Image (tube, grey):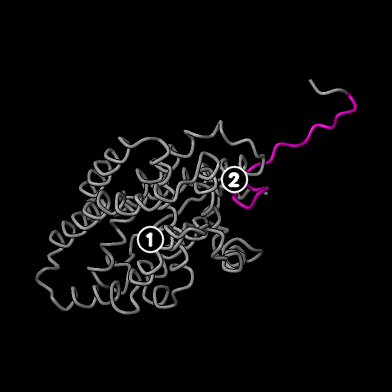
Amino acid sequence: MPSPSTPTLPTLRGPDVGIPPRRMHFDHAPDMPRYMYGDNATASMLFAVLSGFFPPGEQFFVDSVRHYRTRVTDPTLKAQVSGFVGQEAIHSAEHDRLNEFFLDRGIDLTVADRAVRTSLAILERLPARSQLACTAFMEHFTALLGEQLLTHDDFRARANPDALPMWMWHALEELEHKSVSYDVYEVVGNRRLERILAIPVVAATMLPAILASWAYLLVREGTYRNPDDLLRGIGILFGRRGFVTRILRRLPAFGLPDYHPARHDTSAIEAEWRERLFGEDGALLDQARYLPT
């Protein structure tokens, strides 16, 4: 017990270190177009698959970080871990609600859910630190995805305005906590070879699940009978300046000797979107049930 002369330092929380878990509630408009991205089934179904992957995927992220929580002694990183866990839990809950909205419209993500859980079950057989390395790589991907959502003008121009708010909020928070899993990995022993191996391991387990789930939805939508939609969607996603192409180009940076998520500074993007979404006249204030102060 501290002596009377010893001040008790306040315990830091997620909001104190820039990772506030914002409790959100998104009501998805019943008249929202079926294809939220450019009125294109091919591209829209890929985003539906991502939404289906997020709840179990983010639980894997949280579990792999929590496994080493007792090894974290730095008060700032402890608070960042708490903020990370809180944000990911709320992301999962909101994507569960979005996935139910998809199901009500006949877009069944059951196959996507089973596929990602099967892939994650394979990763869960790895040693705990390798799981954390895989999480750090997948968080590298989600940070790049978030940055694209916030900075890719073509995405926001094509996306339906009713669908954008949830994706913008999620994107901002992915940038806010992008370094947490990697910093915990550094605490338990960052091994470059293990990081490099995480890239093909994640690709070999997760990529087939994504592609199979996407193909399943496209068949259900009858998109294979619409080559114009297929070609346009693939161009939007994987063309020379495509949405996914820009992410794929930057994924290998994870294996570089001097890699750290913070080396790519996104603080200005985060500040801009915090103000746009949650500032005095923020676009998402009506969706926020609680904003940490």
Q: Which element type, helix, strand or loop, lies under badge 2?
A: helix
Q: Residue furthest right?
A: 5
Q: Amino acid at mark 1?
A: Ala
Q: Residue at position x 12%, y 61% from top?
A: 219
Asked if residue 228 lies left or right of residue 97, the reply is: left
Asked if residue 157 lies left or right of residue 293, the reply is: left
Q: Quadrant of the N terminus?
A: top right
Q: Which element type, helix, strand or loop, lies under badge 1?
A: loop
Q: Which residue is mark 2?
A: 80
Q: Residue at position x 80%, y 32% from top?
A: 8
| Residue range of the region highlighted in magenta in the rendering | 4-20
Tell me if residue 106 can be seen: no
Q: Which residue is mark 1?
A: 29
Residue 252 part of the magenta segment: no
Count residues near mark 2 (Cα–Cα under 10 Å), then give few for <14, some for 14-19, many for 20+: many
**Where is residue 289 drawn, in percent x and y?**
56, 48
**Where is residue 117 drawn, in percent x and y?**
27, 41
Which circle, 1 or 2, is nearer the viewer? 2
Closer-to-camera residue (292/196): 196
Closer-to-camera residue (90/186): 186
Tell me if residue 277 can be seen: yes
Q: Quadrant of residue 246?
A: bottom left
Number of the label disc, if any, that sits on residue 271: none
Asked if residue 113 lies left or right of residue 152, the reply is: left
Q: Amino acid at mark 2?
A: Gln
